[in-house]
Image: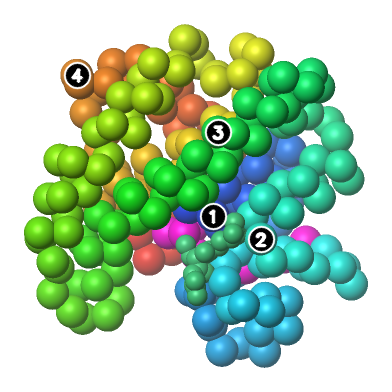
């Protein structure tokens, strides 16, 4: 299996950690979005990362990849069995993908992507607005949801993997979660990143 996508991308990180927790070996190709390599272009119709190639089969979306891997490699299960728990897992993944990633992504884009990759200056007003106004209510919400090492049913699930990814981006950008302000979330995050499969590192840093 080949997984295209730099782990600077929280979506690529989600797929990489998910595969790692399944015990799967993936040949990781840490390309950026819209990489011109023909083998990447052929499997990512929108040029987005991540993209997975499994033999003659391919997929380009982190959620689709995780669903595919869960069905193809059911053990260890990373989706809960019960209807209510499955619904909550999907909610947390959606919350990560559509709310937390875009918001934390503003900080990451301004502090890491613009200066390092685009050779452009950081817009500190955007960073300050995200850090002081937009992100804290989201972390307050998560702080209320966390009751232990995992969000759902006392077991690791895609919900945990998805939620931790944007928190990694904040850390790489030099704004790690303030564990004094969000202590339950801080302990939860520390427990997750201590797991070997969560130790994904981009070759360019982070
Ligand atoms: N829904 C997609 C989103 C993937 C995505 O937006 N990846 C970003 C990198 S973090 C990307 O490739 N952006 C390039 C673009 O939007 O053109 C997924 O879950 O994989």
| Main SS class of the magenta portion in the image | loop
| Closer-to-camera residue (54/204) | 54
Q: What's the distance in space between the residues labelled 2 and 4, CA to CA?
A: 35 Å
Quarter of the figure with the C terminus = bottom left
In depth, the one of 95 and 193 nearer the eye is: 95
Is 105 situated left or right of 22 in this image?
left
Q: Residues within 10 Å of mark 3 (few under 14, many from 20)?
A: many
Task: Indicate which disc, 4 or 3, sits on the residue closer to the N terminus.
Answer: 3
**N-terminal of the two: label 3 or label 1?**
1
Give the Cα distance between marks 2 and 1: 8 Å
Mark 4 vs mark 3, foreground winner is 3
Quick one: label 3 or label 2, which is nearer the N terminus? Answer: 2
Residue where numbered disc 2 is placed: 61
Q: Is residue 8 magenta?
A: yes
Residue 130 to residue 117: above or below: above
Give the number of the disc on residue 11. 1
The CB of the residue at mark 1 lies under 8 Å from ligand 1: yes
10 Å neighbourhood of mark 4: few (<14), some, or many (≥20)? few
The residue at which mark 3 appears reads as 92
Q: Residue at x 30, y 76 (%)?
A: 117
Badge 3 vs badge 2, beta-carbon distance below 8 Å: no
Residue drawn where x is 78% and y is 22% of the image: 83
Label 2 lies in ligand 1 vicinity (Cβ under 8 Å): yes
Q: Secondary structure at mark 3?
A: helix
Left or right relative to 43: residue 171 = left
């Amino acid at each position: 299996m080949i997984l295209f996508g730099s782990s600077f991308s929280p979506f690529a990180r989600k797929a990489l950690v998910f595969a790692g927790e399944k015990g799967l070996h993936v040949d990781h190709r840490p390309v950026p979005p819209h990489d011109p390599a023909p083998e990447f272009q052929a499997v990512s119709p929108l040029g987005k990362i991540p993209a997975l190639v499994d033999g003659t089969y391919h997929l380009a979306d982190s959620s689709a990849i995780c669903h595919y891997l869960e069905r193809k490699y059911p053990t260890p299960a990373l989706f809960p069995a019960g209807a209510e728990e499955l619904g909550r897992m999907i909610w947390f993944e959606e919350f990560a993908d559509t709310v937390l990633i875009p918001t934390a992504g503003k900080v990451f884009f301004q502090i890491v992507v613009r200066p390092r990759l685009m050779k452009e200056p950081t817009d500190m007003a955007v960073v300050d607005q995200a850090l002081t106004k937009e992100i804290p209510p989201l972390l307050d919400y998560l702080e209320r949801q966390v009751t232990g090492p995992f969000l759902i049913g006392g077991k690791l699930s895609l919900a945990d993997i998805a939620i931790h990814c944007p928190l990694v981006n904040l850390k790489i950008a030099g704004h790690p979660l303030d564990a004094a302000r969000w202590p339950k979330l801080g302990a939860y995050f520390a427990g997750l990143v201590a797991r070997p499969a969560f130790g994904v590192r981009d070759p360019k840093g982070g």
